[in-house]
Amino acid sequence: MGEQQFFLKWNDFQNNMVSSFKHLRDEKSFTDVTLACDGQTCKAHKMVLSACSPYFKTLLEENPSKHPIIILKDVSFNHLQAILEFMYAGEVNVSQEQLPSFLKTADRLKVKGLAETQSPFSNKREG
């Protein structure tokens, strides 16, 4: 009785999305937020920031603006650039020397994949 349904899948979807987001960032196309720290700025996309960080999602939802400028206190510009690289590419290189402070910054900004999350299972050990 019903129509036959077809499942269509884009085999390289994730890689294409990562590549597209990186390209949009590199070209500064459609950027709609400016992040500022250490007297320097960089442009980003609200959607990417919100998808990768509940901190940014809440901040952007509670303060709607066409193109907000977010000033990040006590964040080094190098850390911000590395965090954005991680958000857009899913990976980043950080020196061993910078790693502890970088992770602390990522934790303060609640960056998914870098921030420590409180899972009900994280501190429990069976034994």
Image (tube, rainbow, N blue to C red):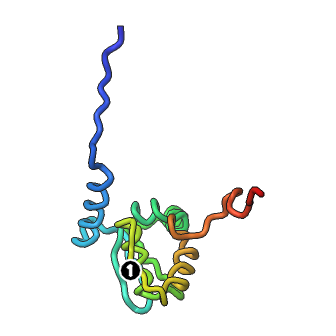
Other-residue count near label 1 (Cα within 10 Å), few / some / many at <14 / 14–19 / ≥20: some
Residue on which disc 1 sits: 81
What type is the residue that disc 1 sits on?
Answer: Gln
Residue 91 location, x and y as percent? Answer: 39, 69
Q: Residue at x 58, y 76 (%)?
A: 108
- In this picture, is 59 found above or below 39? above
- The front one of 56 and 101 is 101
Say left or right for 18 vs 77: left
- In this picture, is 79 found above or below 14? below
State the residue lying farthest toward the front. Answer: 127
Q: Residue at x 37, y 89 (%)?
A: 40
Residue 117 location, x and y as percent? Answer: 62, 64
Residue 122 location, x and y as percent? Answer: 68, 61
Assign the N terminus to one quadrant of the image. Answer: top left
Residue 95 location, x and y as percent? Answer: 43, 85
All told, the count of numbered labels is: 1
The quarter holding residue 126 reads bottom right
- The front one of 52 and 116 is 116
- The front one of 11 and 110 is 11
- In this picture, is 125 found above or below 82? above
State the residue lying farthest toward the top. Answer: 1
- In this picture, is 98 found above or below 13? below
Say left or right for 43 vs 116: left
